[in-house]
Amino acid sequence: MSMSAVLSQPRWQRRADARPQELLEAALTVFVERGYAAARLEEVASRAGVAKATLYRYYENKLELFKAVVRNSLVSGFDEVAKAQAGEPGGAREQLIRLLTAFVQRIAGSPLSGIPKLVIAEASNFPEIARFYHEEVIQRGRAMVIGVLRQGAAAGEFRSVDADYAWRIVIAPLLLAIIWKHSFQAFEPEPMDFERHLEAHLDLLFNGLAPSRNEEDRQWTRN
Amino acid sequence: MSMSAVLSQPRWQRRADARPQELLEAALTVFVERGYAAARLEEVASRAGVAKATLYRYYENKLELFKAVVRNSLVSGFDEVAKAQAGEPGGAREQLIRLLTAFVQRIAGSPLSGIPKLVIAEASNFPEIARFYHEEVIQRGRAMVIGVLRQGAAAGEFRSVDADYAWRIVIAPLLLAIIWKHSFQAFEPEPMDFERHLEAHLDLLFNGLAPSRNEEDRQWTRN
DNA sequence: TCTATAAATGACCGCCGAGTCACTTAATCT
DNA sequence: AGATTAAGTGACTCGGCGGTCATTTATAGA
């Protein structure tokens, strides 16, 4: 009786349709936690509830798995932010605030933040990954920020700056937030407050961009 | 004749005083080229003209070797800059310009820039490395920047800002320059101009920090 | 010249993880 | 039910590297 109950449970199931996605999700976790070189495919497989050899039925090798993970998680997330941005117009200041806030909330504050950090970490060892990230993500972010800067300058809302270099200055604190979270947070007395970090950045940024220094313009505000 | 000439050359020499420094220099190169985990001590030793076991006479293990490398290069460099900084007083603006320029010239433009990138890359796998770097390097940088910000605010030279968070904003573009160089430079049509990058940063930064917006203050200058 | 010593070494160990393969077995088809 | 297929697996190989140790040897000093 109890014997038959035990035997009625198969040792494993065939789920060829669900395996790839489950493996990708497990792989994302492990890659983000350990980095590329230190990620063990044994761990990826076990987190997906599968043996290591099974993983090799779906992905040719470690590098192909990694590429699949990056392609699967990176592009969709970034496009969502870009699409939401296009839907809500407004002044250049509001656009920039919305853009940076969205980034902080959707990426810096989520496990997805592991991706940029991971790409940076492994870029020199795996140039094709860096190239992909540069083409698909960085170029898009660059275009968006430069667009807002030029638009603001044309409207007289911003001072005219060296946009080809300034866009990286605008992005830099966001990247730093990600890096801090993943690399140094554990060693600080209190965790970094992303909200406050972003406010400090916007405060510096807008007071630098503002063409006039009337008292009413001094404080940046969301509305 | 030729035989005795060969035999007269000892198989190796005892150079206990010179070994440590030579090993550190070789180690810096290998760590920067390969990253921490992928750096092979065999290669470090051979570059220093020595066997692997010899390396272990001078450094307890891989981690201690790495710490010694960082102390010997980055930490000592920071202390030098700090000392030079104290020697040349001036306004807070000049101090900050000198500080950031020194960083760009001494680190971003040298192989030393590989160290911060390496630490970021491997922090999660080797927390001891991150902790060490945070204590020995980041704390020094933090203190220097916050010091200048507060001094400038006290002298009325800077606007009063949230220094506990603003210091990271000041540092962020420097970190980004390093990351760019090591991760994405190869995929851009032309290499990033650190000088121009720093100018864009300082332009944004000082116009954000300046308490007044008179025409003469608008342009930041080195003198 | 001889000796003491510590600098230097080659060979080795143990562990780890990517990738492989012969085999098992769940599910499907007839 | 029996045969077929392909999903899944455990056990294995192979190469690499951090770290150790017994031994060799350069060299300073008596």
Image: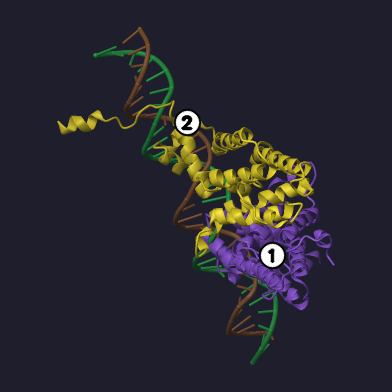
Chain colours: A yellow, B purple, C brown, D green
x 59%, y 46%: residue = A101
Q: Chain of mark 2?
A: A
| Element at label 1 | loop
Give the image quarter of residue A74: top right
For the C terminus of chain B, the image quarter is bottom right
Where residue B124 is drawn, which disc sits there?
Answer: none
Left or right of residue A203, residue A38 in this image: left
Where residue A20 is drawn, which disc sits there?
Answer: 2
Give the image quarter of residue A62: top right
Q: Chain of mark 1?
A: B
| Residue B122 can be seen in this image | yes
Residue type, numbered disc 2: Pro
Q: In the rendering, at what x and y percent does residue A164 appear?
A: 77, 45
**Of A144 and B53, the residue lying toward us:** A144
Left or right of residue A119, residue B187 in this image: right
Q: In the rendering, at what x and y percent does residue B184 appear?
A: 70, 45
Where residue B159 is drawn, which disc sits there?
Answer: 1
Q: In the rendering, at what x and y percent does residue A120 appear?
A: 63, 48
x 19%, y 29%: residue = A4
Looking at the image, residue B92 lies above or below residue C26: below
Mark 2 or 1: in front is 1
Disc 1 residue crowd, few under 14, some 14–19, many 20+, Cα 10 Å:
many
| Element at label 2 | helix
**Of C28 and B17, the residue lying toward us:** C28
Query: Does label 1 lie on the same chain as label 2?
Result: no
x 76%, y 67%: residue = B93
What is the distance, in whole Å, between disc 2 and disc 1 at their CAs?
54 Å
